[in-house]
């Protein structure tokens, strides 16, 4: 029987995530945090708000790919994807409106998204 640890609402805060994983007994091995008796179920909201969003993805993604974790997409990931996805029924428009009220703003690297925390070439996803 596998036991699970539920972790949600990380919001780009990688340092507290690492602290929590270590407190729960997960250890970094070959680039992946693992715990021999348990797995994590991440409950979404990896991005938005925090200073280390890319670092969160660099921690979470290998855990999922190596079977140390499962995940559920949160509304913040959904909104970011919709922001960058063109509406197939309305060419030139996006599934999430590009307005100042959307909460997304231009970044120094050319992104128009809160996902970016370090310069990435314009138009590329981290």
Image (tube, rainbow, N blue to C red):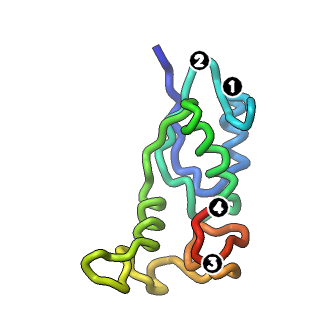
Q: Is residue 91 left or right of residue 10?
A: left
Mark 2, secondary structure of its residue: loop
Q: Against 3, is 121 above or below?
A: below
User: Could you give the CA–CA distance between mark 4 and mark 1, rounded to whole angstroms?
Assistant: 24 Å
Disc 3 residue crowd, few under 14, some 14–19, many 20+, Cα 10 Å: few
Mark 4–mark 2 CB contact (< 8 Å): no
Q: Residues within 10 Å of mark 4 (few under 14, many from 20)?
A: some
- Residue occupying image coordinates x 42% and y 61%: 78
Task: Name the quadrant containing residue 113.
Answer: bottom right
Q: Is residue 3 above or below residue 31?
A: above
Query: Upstream in the sequence, badge 1 or badge 2?
Result: 1
Residue 107, image x and y in percent?
Answer: 65, 80
Rendered location of residue 102, percent (x, y): 45, 79
Query: Circle 4 sits on which residue?
Result: 50
Earlier along the polypeptide chain: callout 4 or callout 2?
2
Q: Earlier in the sequence, mark 4 or mark 3?
A: 4
Mark 3 vs 2: CB contact within 8 A: no
Q: Nearer the viewer, mark 3 or mark 2?
A: 3
Q: List x then y, in percent, for residue 65.
A: 56, 38
Horizontal side, residue 119 vs residue 72: left or right: right
* Residue at left offset 74%, top offset 30%: 29
Q: Nearer the viewer, mark 4 or mark 2?
A: 2
On screen, residue 24 versus residue 39, left or right, reads right
Residue holding disc 2: 37
Instruction: Please tell me which residue is depicted at 50% across the width and 54% down the height of the picture.
Output: 45
Labels 4 and 1 touching (C-beta < 8 A): no
Pointer 3 residue: 122
Q: Mark 1 highlights which residue?
A: 25
| Mark number, residue 109 | none
């Amino acid at each position: 029987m596998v036991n699970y640890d539920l972790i949600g609402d990380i919001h780009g805060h990688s340092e507290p995530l690492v602290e929590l994983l270590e407190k729960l007994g997960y250890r970094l091995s070959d680039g992946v945090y693992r715990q021999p008796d348990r797995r994590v179920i991440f409950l979404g909201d990896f991005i938005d708000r925090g200073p280390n969003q890319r670092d969160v993805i660099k921690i979470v993604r290998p855990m999922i790919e190596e079977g140390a974790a499962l995940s559920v997409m949160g509304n913040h990931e959904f909104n970011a994807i919709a922001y960058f996805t063109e509406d197939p029924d309305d060419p030139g428009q996006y599934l999430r409106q590009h307005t100042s009220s959307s909460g997304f703003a231009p970044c120094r690297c050319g992104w128009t998204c809160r996902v970016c925390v370090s310069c990435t070439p314009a138009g590329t996803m981290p």
